[in-house]
Amino acid sequence: MIEDSILLHDAERDKQRVALSSVLAAVFLTGMKLFIGLVTGSLGILAEAAHSGLDLMAAIMTYFAVRLSGRPADQFHTYGYGKVENLSALFETLLLLLTCVWIIYEAVLRLFYKSVEVEASLWAFLVMLVSIGVDLGRSRALARAARLYDSQALEADALHFSTDIWSSSVVIAGLLLVRMAGWLEVGWLAKADAVAAMGVAVIVAYVSLRLGRRTLSALVDAVPAGVRDEVVRAVRVPGVLEVKRVRVRKSGPQIFSDVTLVVGSGISFEAAHEVSSNAEKAVHRILPGADVIVYVVPDRFEDRGLLDTIRSLAAKHALGTHGVRIYDEGGGRLLELHLEVSDLLTLEEAHAQASAFEEELRQTLPEIDQVVTHIEPTGDSTATRQATLADEIRVLQILEGMPAEIGVVCQPHDLRVHRVGGELLLSFHCTMGQAVSIASAHSITEQVERYLRTRMPELGRVVIHTEPDDGETT
Protein backbone atom coordinates (compact mmCIF):
# COMPACT_ATOMS: atom_id res chain seq x y z
CA MET A 1 0.00 0.00 0.00
CA ILE A 2 2.86 2.36 0.89
CA GLU A 3 4.66 1.40 -2.35
CA ASP A 4 1.50 2.19 -4.35
CA SER A 5 1.31 5.64 -2.71
CA ILE A 6 4.97 6.32 -3.54
CA LEU A 7 4.48 5.26 -7.17
CA LEU A 8 1.38 7.42 -7.47
CA HIS A 9 3.24 10.41 -6.01
CA ASP A 10 6.14 9.92 -8.44
CA ALA A 11 3.73 9.65 -11.37
CA GLU A 12 1.96 12.90 -10.45
CA ARG A 13 5.29 14.68 -9.99
CA ASP A 14 6.51 13.47 -13.40
CA LYS A 15 3.28 14.61 -15.08
CA GLN A 16 3.59 18.05 -13.52
CA ARG A 17 7.26 18.31 -14.55
CA VAL A 18 6.43 17.50 -18.18
CA ALA A 19 3.50 19.94 -18.17
CA LEU A 20 5.64 22.74 -16.70
CA SER A 21 8.40 22.22 -19.26
CA SER A 22 5.74 22.55 -21.96
CA VAL A 23 4.67 25.89 -20.50
CA LEU A 24 8.25 27.17 -20.72
CA ALA A 25 8.60 25.91 -24.31
CA ALA A 26 5.34 27.61 -25.29
CA VAL A 27 6.51 30.90 -23.74
CA PHE A 28 9.70 30.77 -25.81
CA LEU A 29 7.94 29.90 -29.07
CA THR A 30 5.17 32.45 -28.66
CA GLY A 31 7.60 35.30 -27.95
CA MET A 32 9.90 34.36 -30.82
CA LYS A 33 7.11 34.01 -33.39
CA LEU A 34 5.40 37.21 -32.31
CA PHE A 35 8.62 39.23 -32.59
CA ILE A 36 9.64 37.85 -36.00
CA GLY A 37 6.08 38.07 -37.31
CA LEU A 38 5.80 41.75 -36.42
CA VAL A 39 9.20 42.52 -37.90
CA THR A 40 8.57 40.63 -41.17
CA GLY A 41 4.83 41.35 -41.45
CA SER A 42 4.11 37.69 -42.22
CA LEU A 43 0.52 36.75 -41.47
CA GLY A 44 1.55 33.10 -41.50
CA ILE A 45 4.09 33.69 -38.73
CA LEU A 46 1.66 35.92 -36.81
CA ALA A 47 -0.95 33.19 -37.15
CA GLU A 48 1.62 30.77 -35.79
CA ALA A 49 2.33 33.20 -32.95
CA ALA A 50 -1.37 33.31 -32.12
CA HIS A 51 -1.48 29.54 -32.32
CA SER A 52 1.53 29.28 -30.01
CA GLY A 53 -0.10 31.81 -27.69
CA LEU A 54 -3.08 29.55 -27.38
CA ASP A 55 -0.69 26.65 -26.91
CA LEU A 56 0.76 28.63 -24.02
CA MET A 57 -2.68 29.11 -22.50
CA ALA A 58 -3.43 25.45 -23.08
CA ALA A 59 -0.12 24.42 -21.52
CA ILE A 60 -0.82 26.56 -18.45
CA MET A 61 -4.31 25.05 -18.12
CA THR A 62 -2.83 21.59 -18.58
CA TYR A 63 -0.30 22.20 -15.84
CA PHE A 64 -2.91 23.29 -13.31
CA ALA A 65 -5.34 20.59 -14.48
CA VAL A 66 -2.70 17.92 -13.95
CA ARG A 67 -1.95 19.27 -10.49
CA LEU A 68 -5.63 19.36 -9.51
CA SER A 69 -6.53 15.98 -11.04
CA GLY A 70 -3.86 14.32 -8.95
CA ARG A 71 -5.71 15.08 -5.73
CA PRO A 72 -7.20 12.05 -3.97
CA ALA A 73 -10.96 11.52 -3.77
CA ASP A 74 -12.79 13.23 -0.92
CA GLN A 75 -16.31 13.39 0.50
CA PHE A 76 -17.41 15.90 -2.16
CA HIS A 77 -15.60 14.28 -5.12
CA THR A 78 -15.96 10.57 -4.49
CA TYR A 79 -14.57 9.67 -7.94
CA GLY A 80 -11.61 12.03 -7.57
CA TYR A 81 -10.71 15.06 -9.70
CA GLY A 82 -9.86 13.27 -12.94
CA LYS A 83 -12.57 15.08 -14.95
CA VAL A 84 -10.59 18.33 -14.52
CA GLU A 85 -8.26 17.06 -17.25
CA ASN A 86 -11.21 16.59 -19.59
CA LEU A 87 -12.52 20.09 -18.84
CA SER A 88 -9.08 21.52 -19.55
CA ALA A 89 -9.00 19.75 -22.91
CA LEU A 90 -12.47 21.12 -23.74
CA PHE A 91 -11.37 24.71 -23.09
CA GLU A 92 -8.30 24.12 -25.24
CA THR A 93 -10.54 22.96 -28.06
CA LEU A 94 -12.73 26.05 -27.88
CA LEU A 95 -9.72 28.35 -27.89
CA LEU A 96 -8.24 26.62 -30.92
CA LEU A 97 -11.50 26.89 -32.85
CA LEU A 98 -11.70 30.63 -32.11
CA THR A 99 -8.16 30.99 -33.41
CA CYS A 100 -9.12 29.20 -36.61
CA VAL A 101 -11.99 31.62 -37.16
CA TRP A 102 -9.70 34.63 -36.73
CA ILE A 103 -6.98 33.25 -39.04
CA ILE A 104 -9.44 32.42 -41.82
CA TYR A 105 -11.10 35.85 -41.47
CA GLU A 106 -7.77 37.68 -41.74
CA ALA A 107 -6.63 35.49 -44.63
CA VAL A 108 -9.77 36.27 -46.62
CA LEU A 109 -9.20 40.00 -46.06
CA ARG A 110 -5.62 39.77 -47.35
CA LEU A 111 -6.62 37.66 -50.32
CA PHE A 112 -9.48 39.85 -51.55
CA TYR A 113 -9.72 43.20 -49.74
CA LYS A 114 -6.32 44.50 -48.61
CA SER A 115 -2.68 44.17 -49.50
CA VAL A 116 0.05 43.59 -46.93
CA GLU A 117 3.73 43.48 -47.75
CA VAL A 118 5.23 40.23 -46.49
CA GLU A 119 8.97 39.95 -45.99
CA ALA A 120 10.11 36.37 -46.56
CA SER A 121 13.41 36.96 -44.81
CA LEU A 122 15.98 34.57 -43.46
CA TRP A 123 14.67 35.31 -39.95
CA ALA A 124 11.20 34.13 -40.94
CA PHE A 125 12.58 30.80 -42.15
CA LEU A 126 14.85 30.47 -39.14
CA VAL A 127 12.12 31.02 -36.57
CA MET A 128 9.92 28.42 -38.17
CA LEU A 129 12.72 25.85 -38.27
CA VAL A 130 13.49 26.48 -34.61
CA SER A 131 9.78 26.15 -33.85
CA ILE A 132 9.63 22.78 -35.59
CA GLY A 133 12.62 21.52 -33.58
CA VAL A 134 11.13 22.61 -30.23
CA ASP A 135 7.67 21.30 -31.13
CA LEU A 136 9.11 17.94 -32.12
CA GLY A 137 10.89 17.52 -28.79
CA ARG A 138 7.91 18.61 -26.69
CA SER A 139 5.33 16.54 -28.60
CA ARG A 140 7.40 13.39 -28.11
CA ALA A 141 7.90 14.03 -24.39
CA LEU A 142 4.21 14.81 -23.86
CA ALA A 143 3.03 11.83 -25.91
CA ARG A 144 5.32 9.50 -23.93
CA ALA A 145 3.99 10.82 -20.61
CA ALA A 146 0.39 10.70 -21.88
CA ARG A 147 0.74 7.02 -22.81
CA LEU A 148 2.59 6.17 -19.61
CA TYR A 149 0.07 7.81 -17.28
CA ASP A 150 -3.04 7.64 -19.51
CA SER A 151 -3.52 11.40 -19.23
CA GLN A 152 -5.92 13.04 -21.68
CA ALA A 153 -4.70 16.51 -20.71
CA LEU A 154 -1.09 15.66 -21.61
CA GLU A 155 -2.29 13.94 -24.78
CA ALA A 156 -4.15 17.10 -25.78
CA ASP A 157 -1.02 19.14 -25.16
CA ALA A 158 0.99 16.69 -27.26
CA LEU A 159 -1.53 17.11 -30.07
CA HIS A 160 -1.07 20.87 -29.92
CA PHE A 161 2.69 20.64 -30.34
CA SER A 162 2.34 17.98 -33.05
CA THR A 163 -0.05 20.23 -34.94
CA ASP A 164 2.48 23.07 -34.69
CA ILE A 165 5.01 20.92 -36.59
CA TRP A 166 2.69 20.51 -39.57
CA SER A 167 1.37 24.05 -39.48
CA SER A 168 4.91 25.46 -39.29
CA SER A 169 5.80 23.38 -42.33
CA VAL A 170 2.83 24.90 -44.17
CA VAL A 171 4.00 28.42 -43.25
CA ILE A 172 7.51 27.68 -44.54
CA ALA A 173 6.00 26.50 -47.82
CA GLY A 174 4.03 29.78 -48.00
CA LEU A 175 7.11 31.90 -47.37
CA LEU A 176 8.99 30.01 -50.09
CA LEU A 177 6.24 30.78 -52.57
CA VAL A 178 6.33 34.47 -51.60
CA ARG A 179 10.09 34.47 -52.20
CA MET A 180 9.58 32.79 -55.56
CA ALA A 181 7.02 35.45 -56.48
CA GLY A 182 9.81 38.04 -56.30
CA TRP A 183 12.24 35.93 -58.29
CA LEU A 184 9.77 34.88 -60.97
CA GLU A 185 7.80 38.15 -60.94
CA VAL A 186 4.53 36.25 -60.53
CA GLY A 187 2.21 38.50 -58.52
CA TRP A 188 -0.32 35.96 -57.38
CA LEU A 189 2.37 33.98 -55.56
CA ALA A 190 2.59 36.89 -53.09
CA LYS A 191 -0.78 35.78 -51.79
CA ALA A 192 0.66 32.37 -50.85
CA ASP A 193 1.28 33.54 -47.29
CA ALA A 194 -2.44 34.05 -46.71
CA VAL A 195 -3.21 30.73 -48.34
CA ALA A 196 -0.66 29.08 -46.05
CA ALA A 197 -2.35 30.73 -43.07
CA MET A 198 -5.66 29.21 -44.13
CA GLY A 199 -3.92 25.86 -44.39
CA VAL A 200 -2.77 26.28 -40.79
CA ALA A 201 -6.35 27.06 -39.76
CA VAL A 202 -7.66 23.93 -41.48
CA ILE A 203 -5.11 21.71 -39.72
CA VAL A 204 -5.81 23.28 -36.34
CA ALA A 205 -9.59 23.04 -36.82
CA TYR A 206 -9.34 19.36 -37.73
CA VAL A 207 -7.28 18.50 -34.66
CA SER A 208 -9.49 20.67 -32.46
CA LEU A 209 -12.70 18.98 -33.56
CA ARG A 210 -11.19 15.54 -33.08
CA LEU A 211 -9.95 16.49 -29.63
CA GLY A 212 -13.32 18.06 -28.78
CA ARG A 213 -15.15 14.89 -29.72
CA ARG A 214 -12.93 12.77 -27.51
CA THR A 215 -13.23 15.26 -24.66
CA LEU A 216 -17.01 15.36 -24.79
CA SER A 217 -17.11 11.56 -24.90
CA ALA A 218 -15.04 11.44 -21.73
CA LEU A 219 -17.20 14.06 -19.99
CA VAL A 220 -20.42 12.14 -20.70
CA ASP A 221 -18.81 8.85 -19.60
CA ALA A 222 -18.76 7.26 -23.04
CA VAL A 223 -16.59 4.14 -23.28
CA PRO A 224 -14.77 2.81 -26.36
CA ALA A 225 -16.78 0.41 -28.49
CA GLY A 226 -16.53 -3.16 -27.33
CA VAL A 227 -15.17 -2.49 -23.82
CA ARG A 228 -18.48 -3.16 -22.07
CA ASP A 229 -19.04 -6.36 -24.09
CA GLU A 230 -15.56 -7.58 -23.13
CA VAL A 231 -16.34 -7.00 -19.45
CA VAL A 232 -19.67 -8.82 -19.77
CA ARG A 233 -17.94 -11.84 -21.29
CA ALA A 234 -15.17 -11.77 -18.70
CA VAL A 235 -17.40 -11.74 -15.62
CA ARG A 236 -19.31 -14.87 -16.66
CA VAL A 237 -17.22 -16.87 -14.22
CA PRO A 238 -18.42 -20.20 -12.77
CA GLY A 239 -21.39 -19.66 -10.47
CA VAL A 240 -22.82 -16.66 -12.36
CA LEU A 241 -26.33 -17.27 -13.67
CA GLU A 242 -26.80 -13.86 -15.26
CA VAL A 243 -24.87 -10.63 -15.79
CA LYS A 244 -27.54 -8.17 -14.74
CA ARG A 245 -25.72 -4.86 -15.23
CA VAL A 246 -22.28 -3.61 -16.23
CA ARG A 247 -21.24 0.04 -16.08
CA VAL A 248 -17.87 1.51 -16.99
CA ARG A 249 -16.76 5.12 -16.66
CA LYS A 250 -13.48 6.99 -16.75
CA SER A 251 -12.37 9.94 -14.65
CA GLY A 252 -9.03 11.18 -15.92
CA PRO A 253 -6.73 8.15 -16.11
CA GLN A 254 -8.75 6.17 -13.55
CA ILE A 255 -11.33 3.65 -14.79
CA PHE A 256 -14.32 2.71 -12.62
CA SER A 257 -16.50 -0.33 -13.22
CA ASP A 258 -19.45 -1.69 -11.26
CA VAL A 259 -20.96 -5.06 -12.07
CA THR A 260 -24.14 -6.71 -10.81
CA LEU A 261 -24.17 -10.50 -11.02
CA VAL A 262 -26.99 -12.96 -10.34
CA VAL A 263 -26.08 -16.16 -8.49
CA GLY A 264 -28.11 -19.05 -7.15
CA SER A 265 -30.10 -18.10 -4.07
CA GLY A 266 -29.07 -21.31 -2.36
CA ILE A 267 -25.30 -20.85 -2.42
CA SER A 268 -23.38 -19.99 0.73
CA PHE A 269 -21.93 -16.60 1.60
CA GLU A 270 -18.41 -17.95 1.08
CA ALA A 271 -19.30 -19.24 -2.39
CA ALA A 272 -20.88 -15.91 -3.34
CA HIS A 273 -17.75 -14.09 -2.15
CA GLU A 274 -15.58 -16.38 -4.29
CA VAL A 275 -17.73 -15.65 -7.35
CA SER A 276 -17.37 -11.91 -6.67
CA SER A 277 -13.58 -12.16 -6.29
CA ASN A 278 -13.21 -14.17 -9.50
CA ALA A 279 -15.32 -11.67 -11.42
CA GLU A 280 -13.26 -8.76 -10.07
CA LYS A 281 -10.01 -10.46 -11.16
CA ALA A 282 -11.50 -11.07 -14.62
CA VAL A 283 -12.28 -7.34 -15.01
CA HIS A 284 -8.75 -6.40 -13.91
CA ARG A 285 -7.31 -8.60 -16.64
CA ILE A 286 -9.18 -6.47 -19.21
CA LEU A 287 -8.91 -3.10 -17.45
CA PRO A 288 -5.68 -3.11 -15.41
CA GLY A 289 -5.77 -0.75 -12.45
CA ALA A 290 -9.53 -0.27 -12.64
CA ASP A 291 -11.57 0.42 -9.50
CA VAL A 292 -14.02 -2.50 -9.64
CA ILE A 293 -17.11 -3.08 -7.49
CA VAL A 294 -19.01 -6.36 -7.89
CA TYR A 295 -22.55 -6.69 -6.52
CA VAL A 296 -23.87 -10.22 -6.07
CA VAL A 297 -27.65 -10.72 -5.88
CA PRO A 298 -29.65 -13.96 -5.53
CA ASP A 299 -31.52 -15.30 -8.52
CA ARG A 300 -35.22 -14.72 -8.92
CA PHE A 301 -37.61 -17.61 -8.61
CA GLU A 302 -38.03 -17.96 -12.34
CA ASP A 303 -34.40 -19.00 -12.60
CA ARG A 304 -35.31 -22.31 -10.94
CA GLY A 305 -37.85 -25.00 -11.66
CA LEU A 306 -41.54 -24.38 -11.13
CA LEU A 307 -41.79 -26.89 -8.29
CA ASP A 308 -38.93 -25.23 -6.43
CA THR A 309 -40.58 -21.86 -6.97
CA ILE A 310 -43.92 -23.03 -5.59
CA ARG A 311 -42.35 -24.71 -2.57
CA SER A 312 -40.20 -21.68 -1.78
CA LEU A 313 -43.15 -19.31 -1.95
CA ALA A 314 -45.26 -21.63 0.18
CA ALA A 315 -42.53 -21.85 2.82
CA LYS A 316 -42.32 -18.05 2.78
CA HIS A 317 -46.01 -17.95 3.77
CA ALA A 318 -45.56 -20.73 6.38
CA LEU A 319 -47.38 -23.24 4.20
CA GLY A 320 -46.61 -26.80 3.21
CA THR A 321 -47.40 -28.24 -0.22
CA HIS A 322 -48.02 -31.60 -1.81
CA GLY A 323 -49.95 -33.00 -4.74
CA VAL A 324 -48.71 -30.27 -7.08
CA ARG A 325 -50.02 -30.69 -10.60
CA ILE A 326 -49.57 -28.39 -13.62
CA TYR A 327 -51.78 -28.74 -16.71
CA ASP A 328 -51.58 -27.08 -20.11
CA GLU A 329 -55.08 -26.06 -21.19
CA GLY A 330 -55.90 -24.12 -24.34
CA GLY A 331 -52.65 -22.17 -24.46
CA GLY A 332 -52.74 -21.45 -20.72
CA ARG A 333 -51.48 -23.26 -17.63
CA LEU A 334 -53.49 -24.50 -14.66
CA LEU A 335 -51.91 -25.18 -11.28
CA GLU A 336 -53.50 -27.48 -8.72
CA LEU A 337 -51.97 -28.19 -5.32
CA HIS A 338 -52.72 -29.04 -1.71
CA LEU A 339 -51.78 -26.41 0.87
CA GLU A 340 -50.98 -27.51 4.40
CA VAL A 341 -51.87 -24.96 7.06
CA SER A 342 -51.79 -25.07 10.82
CA ASP A 343 -54.91 -26.81 12.17
CA LEU A 344 -55.05 -24.15 14.90
CA LEU A 345 -56.25 -21.58 12.34
CA THR A 346 -59.87 -20.74 11.57
CA LEU A 347 -61.15 -21.20 8.05
CA GLU A 348 -61.06 -17.42 7.54
CA GLU A 349 -57.43 -17.19 8.67
CA ALA A 350 -56.35 -20.17 6.59
CA HIS A 351 -58.12 -18.78 3.52
CA ALA A 352 -56.40 -15.39 3.95
CA GLN A 353 -53.04 -17.11 4.25
CA ALA A 354 -53.69 -19.16 1.11
CA SER A 355 -54.94 -16.10 -0.81
CA ALA A 356 -51.76 -14.17 -0.02
CA PHE A 357 -49.72 -17.08 -1.30
CA GLU A 358 -51.78 -17.33 -4.49
CA GLU A 359 -51.44 -13.60 -5.17
CA GLU A 360 -47.64 -13.65 -4.89
CA LEU A 361 -47.51 -16.84 -6.92
CA ARG A 362 -49.38 -15.16 -9.81
CA GLN A 363 -47.02 -12.18 -9.69
CA THR A 364 -43.92 -14.39 -9.63
CA LEU A 365 -45.14 -16.85 -12.28
CA PRO A 366 -47.27 -14.86 -14.73
CA GLU A 367 -47.35 -17.87 -17.07
CA ILE A 368 -49.74 -19.56 -14.60
CA ASP A 369 -53.25 -18.50 -15.65
CA GLN A 370 -55.26 -20.23 -12.92
CA VAL A 371 -54.48 -21.53 -9.43
CA VAL A 372 -56.68 -24.05 -7.62
CA THR A 373 -55.70 -24.87 -4.03
CA HIS A 374 -57.05 -27.38 -1.54
CA ILE A 375 -56.50 -26.30 2.07
CA GLU A 376 -55.87 -29.00 4.65
CA PRO A 377 -54.38 -29.12 8.14
CA THR A 378 -50.81 -30.23 8.65
CA GLY A 379 -51.83 -32.08 11.84
CA ASP A 380 -50.05 -32.07 15.20
CA SER A 381 -49.06 -34.67 17.78
CA THR A 382 -52.64 -35.20 18.84
CA ALA A 383 -53.84 -35.70 15.26
CA THR A 384 -51.22 -38.26 14.31
CA ARG A 385 -50.50 -41.73 15.57
CA GLN A 386 -47.67 -44.15 15.20
CA ALA A 387 -48.05 -46.44 12.24
CA THR A 388 -48.56 -50.15 12.84
CA LEU A 389 -45.70 -52.60 12.82
CA ALA A 390 -47.07 -53.98 9.56
CA ASP A 391 -46.76 -50.49 7.99
CA GLU A 392 -43.13 -50.20 9.04
CA ILE A 393 -42.21 -53.69 7.81
CA ARG A 394 -43.86 -52.96 4.47
CA VAL A 395 -41.96 -49.69 4.05
CA LEU A 396 -38.65 -51.32 4.99
CA GLN A 397 -39.15 -54.10 2.47
CA ILE A 398 -39.88 -51.60 -0.29
CA LEU A 399 -36.83 -49.53 0.61
CA GLU A 400 -34.55 -52.57 0.71
CA GLY A 401 -35.64 -53.67 -2.77
CA MET A 402 -35.44 -50.17 -4.21
CA PRO A 403 -31.76 -50.08 -5.37
CA ALA A 404 -32.14 -53.24 -7.46
CA GLU A 405 -35.37 -52.02 -9.11
CA ILE A 406 -34.55 -48.39 -9.97
CA GLY A 407 -30.74 -48.48 -9.76
CA VAL A 408 -30.22 -45.60 -7.29
CA VAL A 409 -27.57 -45.45 -4.59
CA CYS A 410 -29.28 -44.57 -1.32
CA GLN A 411 -28.78 -46.13 2.11
CA PRO A 412 -31.99 -45.40 4.09
CA HIS A 413 -32.01 -45.19 7.90
CA ASP A 414 -33.74 -43.38 10.79
CA LEU A 415 -37.13 -44.34 9.37
CA ARG A 416 -40.23 -42.62 10.79
CA VAL A 417 -43.74 -43.74 9.75
CA HIS A 418 -47.01 -42.10 10.89
CA ARG A 419 -50.62 -42.12 9.81
CA VAL A 420 -52.93 -39.12 9.51
CA GLY A 421 -56.40 -40.12 8.51
CA GLY A 422 -56.01 -42.50 5.62
CA GLU A 423 -52.58 -41.21 4.58
CA LEU A 424 -49.21 -42.66 5.43
CA LEU A 425 -46.57 -40.04 6.36
CA LEU A 426 -42.98 -41.10 5.84
CA SER A 427 -39.56 -39.62 6.66
CA PHE A 428 -36.08 -41.13 6.61
CA HIS A 429 -32.40 -40.30 6.03
CA CYS A 430 -30.70 -41.24 2.78
CA THR A 431 -26.90 -41.62 2.83
CA MET A 432 -24.99 -41.05 -0.42
CA GLY A 433 -21.38 -40.73 -1.52
CA GLN A 434 -19.51 -37.59 -0.56
CA ALA A 435 -18.71 -36.72 -4.19
CA VAL A 436 -22.36 -36.76 -5.31
CA SER A 437 -23.40 -33.26 -6.47
CA ILE A 438 -26.38 -31.55 -4.87
CA ALA A 439 -28.20 -31.64 -8.21
CA SER A 440 -27.68 -35.41 -8.48
CA ALA A 441 -28.74 -35.91 -4.85
CA HIS A 442 -31.94 -33.98 -5.49
CA SER A 443 -32.64 -36.03 -8.61
CA ILE A 444 -32.14 -39.27 -6.67
CA THR A 445 -34.59 -38.24 -3.92
CA GLU A 446 -37.19 -37.41 -6.57
CA GLN A 447 -36.75 -40.87 -8.12
CA VAL A 448 -37.07 -42.48 -4.69
CA GLU A 449 -40.26 -40.55 -3.91
CA ARG A 450 -41.83 -41.45 -7.25
CA TYR A 451 -40.91 -45.10 -6.72
CA LEU A 452 -42.45 -45.12 -3.23
CA ARG A 453 -45.68 -43.55 -4.46
CA THR A 454 -46.07 -46.20 -7.17
CA ARG A 455 -45.72 -48.92 -4.54
CA MET A 456 -47.83 -47.20 -1.83
CA PRO A 457 -50.83 -45.35 -3.30
CA GLU A 458 -51.93 -44.17 0.18
CA LEU A 459 -48.59 -42.40 0.73
CA GLY A 460 -49.00 -38.76 1.76
CA ARG A 461 -46.13 -36.48 2.69
CA VAL A 462 -42.60 -37.82 2.19
CA VAL A 463 -39.52 -36.15 3.69
CA ILE A 464 -36.14 -37.50 2.58
CA HIS A 465 -33.08 -36.05 4.31
CA THR A 466 -29.90 -36.53 2.27
CA GLU A 467 -26.48 -36.71 3.92
CA PRO A 468 -22.95 -37.74 2.86
CA ASP A 469 -21.38 -40.95 4.10
CA ASP A 470 -18.42 -40.84 6.47
CA GLY A 471 -16.00 -41.85 3.72
CA GLU A 472 -15.01 -45.11 5.43
CA THR A 473 -14.90 -48.34 3.47
CA THR A 474 -16.00 -51.68 4.82
Image (cartoon, rainbow, N blue to C red):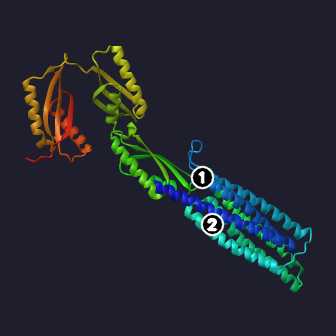
> Residue 309's image quarter?
top left
Residue 15 locus on image (x, y percent)? 60, 61
Looking at the image, do the residues carrying marks 1 and 2 touch, with CB atoms under 8 Å apart? no
Q: Nearer the viewer, residue 361 or 154?
A: 154
| Left or right, 436 with reference to 90 | left
Q: Give the CA distance from mark 1 to mark 2.
A: 18 Å
> Residue 180's image quarter?
bottom right
Q: Nearer the viewer, residue 406 or 17?
A: 17
Q: Can the viewer see residue 235 in this picture?
A: no
| Left or right, 430 with reference to 307 | left
Q: Residue at x 73, y 60 (%)?
A: 57
Q: Secondary structure at mark 2?
A: helix
Residue 304 locus on image (x, y percent)? 35, 40
Residue 131 locus on image (x, y percent)? 73, 73
Q: Residue at x 71, y 74 (%)?
A: 132
Judging by the rendered image, the residue that carries numbered circle 2 is: 142
**Amino acid type at mark 2:** Leu
Rendered image: mark on residue 82: 1
Q: From what the image shows, is residue 194 above or below residue 473? A: below
| Left or right, 416 with reference to 252 | left
Q: Secondary structure at mark 1?
A: loop
Q: Can the viewer see residue 9 in this picture?
A: yes
**Amino acid type at mark 1:** Gly
Residue 30 locus on image (x, y percent)? 77, 67
